[in-house]
Amino acid sequence: MVETIIKAPQISPKEYQKYRGKHVAIYKNKIIAHGNNSDEALKQALQKHPKLKPEQIEIYYIQIADELIL
């Protein structure tokens, strides 16, 4: 059996508040762009950093809520 481990991005509480509900593009543990969807975030990242390749950029969604209430 193969186990997959997914690491969450390390972002500051200030960044978390700023980007809630957004998709962020991360390169070398820094947010380099953001957008309302993953395509927009990637497109902005590649425009700002044209030497990067898409596979070098990680895309994450920053949740709006801290907790899920059932």
Image (cartoon, rainbow, N blue to C red):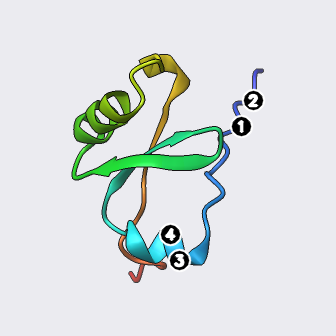
Mark closest to the chain's N terminus, 3 or 2: 2
Among the two numbered marks 1 and 3 on one chain, the one whose residue lies closer to the N terminus: 1
Q: Nearer the viewer, mark 2 or mark 1?
A: 1
Mark 3 surroundings within 10 Å by alpha-carbon count, few (fewer than 14), some (14 through 19), many (20 or more)? few
Marks 2 and 1, Cα distance to the nearest angstrom? 7 Å
Label 4 to label 1, Cα distance in Å?
Answer: 24 Å
Residue 14's tag is 3
Q: Position of residue 65 (x, y in %)?
A: 40, 77
Q: What x and y, as percent, mark residue 4?
A: 69, 31
Query: Residues under labels 4 and 3: Cα distance?
Result: 4 Å
Vertical placement of residue 19 versus 48, above or below? below
Marks 4/3 in contact by CB < 8 Å: the verdict is yes
Mark 4 or mark 1: name the one nearer the start of the chain.
1
Question: Which amino acid lies under the numbered mark 2 shown in the image of this protein?
Answer: Glu
* Circle 2/circle 1 CB separation < 8 Å: yes
Give, as a three-letter code, the residue at label 1.
Answer: Ile
The CA span between labels 2 and 4 is 30 Å
Residue in the picture at 30% in, 30% down: 47
The residue at 46%/18% (across/down) is 51
Q: Nearer the viewer, residue 61 or 69?
A: 61
Q: How far is the residue under mark 3 from the one under mark 2?
A: 32 Å
Q: Which residue is mark 2?
A: 3
Disc 2 vs disc 4: which is toward the camera?
Answer: 4
Residue at which label 1 appears: 5
- Residue at image point 40% right, 83% down: 69
Mark 2 or mark 4, earlier in chain: 2
Q: Look at the image and tell me in which quarter the N terminus lies.
A: top right
Of circles 4 and 1, the one toward us is 4
Taking depth in this image into account, of 5 and 14 the one nearest to the observer is: 14
Asked which secondary structure carries label 1, the reply is: loop
Secondary structure, mark 3, is helix
